[in-house]
């Protein structure tokens, strides 16, 4: 099993950058690039890490992702991207962009 630690720095300028530490399990996780307000905030998440970080916000309940007939929340979108292997295709909703960037091996 390959497991690395990634430190992602994100902010509009280096002075205000904060770090998000994440253990990467490259063989056993799917990864998504997520950004808000262009590149003001940019993070790499698994489905589980996105849920954990944003469970207190309205992100998980927002059903405005139009990916096929019907409206879906961001977790349903992630499931759809994993199932159909939509790698490197950006999807946008309001001020958020999400892109599936790494599949499980």
Image (cartoon, rainbow, N blue to C red):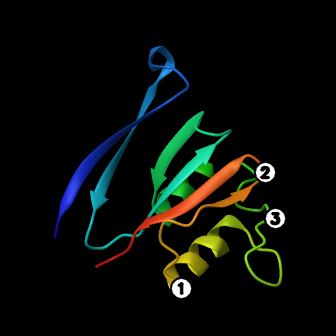
Disc 1 packing (10 Å; few <14; some 14–19; many ≥20) = few
- Residue lying at 76% horizontally and 82% vertically, measured from the top left: 68
Is 94 on the left-hand or right-hand side of 15?
right
Residue 3: x %, y % from top left: 20, 59
Residue 90: x %, y % from top left: 60, 61
Quadrant position of the C terminus in the picture = bottom left
Considering the numbered disc 1 on the image, is that residue within a helix, a strand or a loop? Answer: helix
Is 62 on the left-hand or right-hand side of 39?
right
Disc 2 packing (10 Å; few <14; some 14–19; many ≥20) = few
Residue 67: x %, y % from top left: 73, 76
Residue 93: x %, y % from top left: 75, 57
* Residue 21 is at least partly visible in this image: yes
3 and 2 marks in contact (CB < 8 Å): yes
Total tally of numbered discs in the picture = 3
* Residue 55 is at least partly visible in this image: no
Is 69 on the left-hand or right-hand side of 34?
right
Which mark is drawn over residue 84?
Answer: 1
Which mark is drawn over residue 94?
Answer: 2
Q: Alpha carbon of mark 3 to alpha carbon of mark 1: how far? A: 20 Å
Name which of mark 3 and mark 2 comes first in the sequence. 3
Name which of mark 2 and mark 1 comes first in the sequence. 1
Which mark is drawn over residue 64?
Answer: 3
């Amino acid at each position: 099993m390959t497991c690395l630690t990634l430190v992602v720095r994100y902010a509009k300028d280096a002075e205000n950058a904060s770090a998000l530490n994440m253990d990467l399990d490259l063989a056993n996780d799917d990864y998504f690039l997520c950004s808000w307000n262009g590149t003001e905030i940019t993070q790499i998440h698994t489905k589980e890490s996105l849920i954990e970080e944003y469970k207190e916000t309205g992100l998980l309940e927002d059903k405005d992702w139009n990916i096929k007939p019907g409206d879906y929340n961001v977790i349903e979108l992630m499931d759809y991207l994993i199932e159909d292997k939509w790698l490197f295709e950006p999807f946008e909703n309001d001020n958020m962009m999400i892109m599936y960037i790494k599949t499980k091996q």
